[in-house]
Amino acid sequence: MKGNILGDIRAEQDITMLKSAFWETSDYKSLLETYDRPIIVGRRGTGKSAIAHKLSTHWSSKPKIQILKISPEEEQIIGLRDIFDLFGEKYLHIKAGTKMAWRYAIYMEIIVDILNHYKYSKNIDIAPIREHITSWGSRRISIATKIRKKLKSILETESTPQSRIADLSDALELELVEEVLFEALESNDIRYVVFADRLDEGYSPDNLGVAIVDGFIQSAIDIKSRLSERVITFAFVRDNIYRAIAKLDPDFTRNIEGQTLRLHWDEYNLFNLVCNRMRVAFNDKTEKSVRLWNKYTANELRGIEGFRTALKLTLYRPRDILVLLNEAFLRANSRERKEIILEDIETTSKSISINRLSDLHKEYEYIFPSLELFTSTFHGSSSEISFEDCKKSLSPILKEDHLEKDKQQDIFLFENSTQVIQRLYSIGFLGLYNIKTSSFIFCHDGKDPDRELSTSSRLLIHPCYWLALATQQSELKLAEAEDIHDEYDIEVTSEDNEHRYKRIEALIQELNTIEEGRSGAHDFESWVEKVVKILFASTLWNVEAHPNKNGLQQRDIVATNHGETKFWNRVLSDYNTRQVIFEVKNYQELKASDYRQLNGYLTGQHGQIGFFITRDHNNNLERDRDLQWAKEIYFEHKKIIIKISHKFLEKHLRKARSPQKHDAMDKELNNLIDTYIRQYLITKSR
C-alpha cells in the first residue's frame, strides 16, 4: 500500500484523484454557475488549489473560452518586494501602484496568449502597442519576473513615491493596452478566465506583503467591470491574508467584501469526499457511501457516528481528514488489516494535532501576533474550562510588558481577558456551550464573535488541539464527540441566507445516506436530534437524546417545552406536556407494541401527548393499523400519539432555508392535531 492511499494533500501532486474522485461541493457548483464571487477565500487545507485546478479543467473544455493560469513561486513574489517598495511606505500608495502593475500584467499576458493562437492572432491590432509586446517577453517567463523588469525600466528612482504612482498609468499606457485587448476579444468573440492561485507564496505579513495581494484582488475586480466580463479573474486567497486586507484597506467593504466566496466544509461534504477517494483507492464500486465506509472501518468507527469521531480531531478541512485517514490506513496495513480502527486514528492524531496548532499560529501571526502566547496558557489544562478559570489563565499575559513589539502592541489592544476569549472563539480555538442546543459551538472562518459571554459560560478547547496541548482529557471518547458540533455544520446561527441555505441543504442530503432499519437506526436518531434542534430552535430547549441512560425506559429524544409558540403553548396547556418525547423509529410501519411503549412513557411532566418520528412518507394514519392503535391509546388512556414522517421534517427543513417561513411548521402541527381530534379520534354515532 502506498503512503497516501487517499491521495496527496497537495493539489498539484494529486491530479489523478482530482480527475477521478473530485467531490463537487455547493461552493464549487456556484463558481461554475456565476462570476459574481471571483475572490475565493479559505483557510489552509480547504481545497483552494484543488478547486482552481478543477475549474480550469472545466472551462478549458468550453468553446470560445481561453484559460490563463497565474501561479507564482515564492522567490518570484519575494523578488517583487524591492520594486514595489518604490511606491513608498503608506498602504494605500502601495496598493494603488500594485493594482495598476497587476492590471497591466494580466492584460499583457492575455495579449501574448492571443498572439500565439493561429486563429485569434489575425484579429488583433498590435501596431499601437508593438513596443509593449516586444518588451514584455514570452510566455515561458514568469509574470512576476516580467512585472519586475517592466517597472524597473519605467520608474524614476529619483522621484517621490507619489510621483511614481501618478505617472505609472501613463507610462504603462494602460488605457491604450486595454482598448486594444477589448477590441481583440470582441472581434474574436472569446472570453478569458484567469485563475490566480498560490498568491500567498512568499507572503510576508507587513504592509507591503498585504498590499501586493490586495492590489491583485483589486485589479481582478476592476478588469471584470472594465472589460464587460470578457475577462474574469478568479483569485484564491488564504483567510489570514484576506483578514489582513480587511484590516488595512479602508475600501474593503465597498470594493471587496461583496465579491467574496468563503469556502465552507461540513460533515456531509467531507464524508463524500473521503468515500469518493476510497472508491478509487480500493477500486470499490459500492454506491452507498455509508456501506463503503463500513467495509473499511471497524468497531467505533463504523457508520456516520464513527466518521464524526475521526472528524472531531480535525478542523473540518479536507487536508486534515485526508492526512488522518492516510496515516490510519498505513498503520492498519502494517498490521495486515484492511479495516481501520479507533486506535489507528488515535496513534497518529498527536503529530497531526501539533501540526494543526502550528498551522493556527502561522495562519494568524499577522492578524493575532500574540496568539501563541495565549494558546500556551492552556497547556496541561482541562479540555473544558469555565469562563472564570479561562480569564484567570489569560490575565497574566495581558500584564506582560517586555515582549516583542508586534506581540506587545497586540496585547495592548485588548482591554480585558474577555476580549481575548472572544478572539479565541472567532478563530475556532475555543468553543462555546449553547444551552439551547446542548452542544459546544465552534467558529472556523475567523469572523467576529457573535455570541455573548457570561460568568456561567462553558468553554471547550477544540479537540484537534487536545493532544498538542497535553490537556487532562486528551482522549476523545465517542460519547464526548457527539456533544461537539461545528457551527456551520449543525446550528443555523448566521443571518446570511447563503450560509443558512448551505447548512440546511447538507443536512437534507445526509438523510439520503441513512439506510432504513436496524443498521441505520442510530444515524437516523442522530439526524432527527439535529433536525429537532433546528426546526424548534428557541421554542424547545435542552433537546437531549436518551436522557435516562441508566433507566429501564430510555426515551429517544426529550426536549423542554416553555410554550413559546401557539402550537407548543397548546401542547403545554391542553396536554400538560412540559417534557416532550419524540420516539424515533427508523422504519415505516409502526406496531402495536410501539404505541404501547410510548404510552408507557407519557407520565408526569411528559403529559398526555407524544410524537413518533418514522420513515413513513406521510403523516396519515392507516385504517386497521395506526388508526386502531392510536384510538386505543386515546380512548383507554386519554393520550394522543402523533405520527410524523421523515418527509414532513424534510419539507420543513427546506422551508427553514428561508427565515421568513419560520412559523410554517407551527401552523401545520396545529392543523395536524385538529385532524386527529376531528377525523381520527372520534366515535361514529350508531
Image (tube, helix red, strand yellow):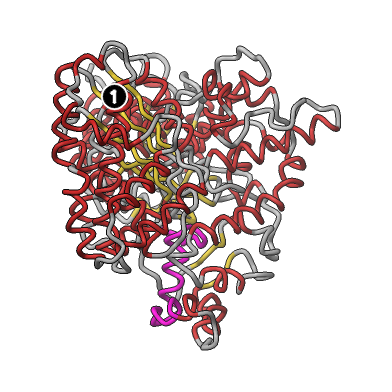
Q: Is residue 681 above or below residue 353?
A: above
Residue at the (70%, 65%) spot, across then down? 472
- Give the quadrant of the N terminus: top right
Question: Does residue 212 lie above or below 663 as drawn?
Answer: below
Please give the range of residues in magenta.
409-435
Nearest the eye: 363 or 572:
363
Closer to the camera in the image, 162 or 257 = 162
Where residue 257 appears, as percent x and y from the top left, is 25, 50
The x and y percentages for residue 444 are 45, 52
Taking the spot 58% from the left edge, 65% from the top edge, the residue there is 384
Image-quadrant location for residue 686: top left
Q: In the figure, is residue 586 to the left or right of 39? A: right
Say which of 534 and 226 sits in front.
226
Q: In the rendering, at what x and y percent does residue 169 appear?
A: 18, 49
Instruction: Give the residue at mark 1.
Output: 680
- Element under label 1? helix
Q: Is residue 198 magenta?
A: no
Hey, which residue is sitting farthest right in the picture?
A: 335
Residue 469 % position (x, y): 66, 64
Residue, x 60% and y 58% (percent of image)?
357
Q: Which amino acid does label 1 sit on?
A: Tyr
Tell me where residue 150 sits by quadrant.
top left
